[in-house]
Image (spheres, helix red, strand yellow):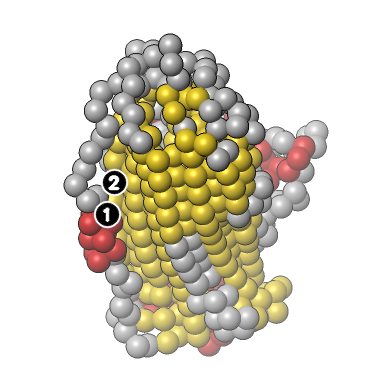
Amino acid sequence: MTENWPRRRVLGMGGAILGGGLLAAAVGGPAFAQTDPWKTADAIRRRVRAPKFPHHEYRITDFGAKGDGVTDCTRAFEAAIGTCARRGGGHVIVPPGRYLTGPINLRSFVDLRVSEGATILFSTDPQKYPPVYTRWQGIECYNYSPFIYAYGARNVAVTGKGTLDGQAGNTAWWPWTGSTRYGWTQGIPTQGDDWNALQDMADRGVPVRERVFGPGHYLRPNMVQPYRCRDVLIEDVTIVNSPMWEIHPVLSQRVLVRNVTVSSHGPNNDGCDPESCTDVVITGSTFDTGDDCIAIKSGRNADGRRVNVPSRNILVENCEMRDGHGGVTMGSEESGGISGVFAQNLRMTSPNLGYGLRLKTNSVRGGYIHDVHMRDVEVTQIADAAIQIDFYYDEGPGHPYNPSVSGINVENLHVGTTNRVFEMRGYPDDPIRDITLTHCVFDKATNTDIVEDVEGLVLNDVTVNGKPLEPATN
């Protein structure tokens, strides 16, 4: 069944009947078409290869590190990485044990290999993390160093079957959110004033060198951040207890995230957030998070438009998503644009996962999300909606920078139980365009859909509650 219906604004489900009956959608115009887009995904995979390193090994214990969980090993990490880099690169080995440290700064041609049985414990003392050039929720600034950080490096890696433990929780880092859920009590400082100040600086065009936060301020650091890097590998490690975003490559090219496990349920604990990156592959990984499992971004508001670098050519495959706000998400920081996103062979397995495919933006973000393809996805249960495209996220409508979302294609999606199939809301003067679902089955949808201001919604063999999803009649 292929349907291409005239445009009509629909509030609530507006015609989608429980039990798999009717769908009234705002549609019109031809469906987005592209000849075999998955060839592009294959090309991305071929381009993004694991970097190679010289066969030299440098054990951090040879530089004074002790795996007792108490001794500060910051200088041992610095010495081992510095020696490795000066000698042409290789592998810095973290042997079994528990190693307490401050920030780790990686350099070109260095692989930090965290052995099975090894845990890197990152200090909870904010004074240990001097400001570096970074992004905080899509805005450039100087802030606390990410726990593992590389700037302008090439051929850089974090590998091994060990664990990166940020030691964040309701007694460290998380209370800065100001939420009692995350340990805040009266008298504990919060990030609110600093976040407002950073946004104001960006809106006023204050130079990045003058946007200095870090010690004495309360913007939580990210866990792992390669910034302006090329040929990056993050492989096999387990990441737990992060202050906020776990894996956050920024303005980087050819990034491979492979066989990683992320398990961290704190505030803003996104699993992997490629931001303004080109050629990224996320594969074989498991995400169990307190926020979006994967969130593709490209800068926020005025600062995102100033930098103006999109995220493009992103491939997500063979991954499992458990708890989280969204499985594969784009936005909300997407002012620089997002295009060429491919997601396939995914499993989503938790009743605590809010959305399967989630696109969120508004008229302050602006930007675009184009050319998104998802196929062969198995979902046991979704708490909110299988597919969300939301122009009303956060600031919503009424601002000067309407977003553009079009060319969203979903094929072979099977969902066991969901509250809704669709939660899609564009603007009357800026509709969502060209959404196509093909061979999709939703075993049980328990509530009415929301489809507002959408043009070009096409359904090819879509079944809800055992019945074909069909257009409503006037």
Label 1, label 2: how far apart the Cα atoms are: 10 Å
Q: Residues within 10 Å of mark 2 (few under 14, many from 20)?
A: many
In this image, 417 relative to 314: left or right?
Answer: right
Please give the residue where the numbered disc 2 appears in the rendered image: 340
Residue 218 in picture, x, y percent from top left:
61, 40
Residue 440: quadrant of the picture:
top left
Sequence order check, earlier mark of 1 and 2: 1
Q: Which residue is located at x 37 percent, y 43 percent?
A: 438
* Image: 95 above or below 468: below
Q: Which residue is located at x 66 percent, y 76 percent?
A: 98
Q: Residues within 10 Å of mark 1 (few under 14, many from 20)?
A: some
The kind of residue on which mark 2 rests is Gly
* Image: 154 above or below 389: below
Q: Residue furthest right?
A: 186
From the viewer's side, name the closer residue of 357 and 158.
Answer: 357
From the viewer's side, name the closer residue of 10 and 308.
Answer: 10
Please give the residue where the numbered disc 1 appears in the rendered image: 38
The kind of residue on which mark 1 rests is Trp
Q: Secondary structure at mark 1?
A: helix
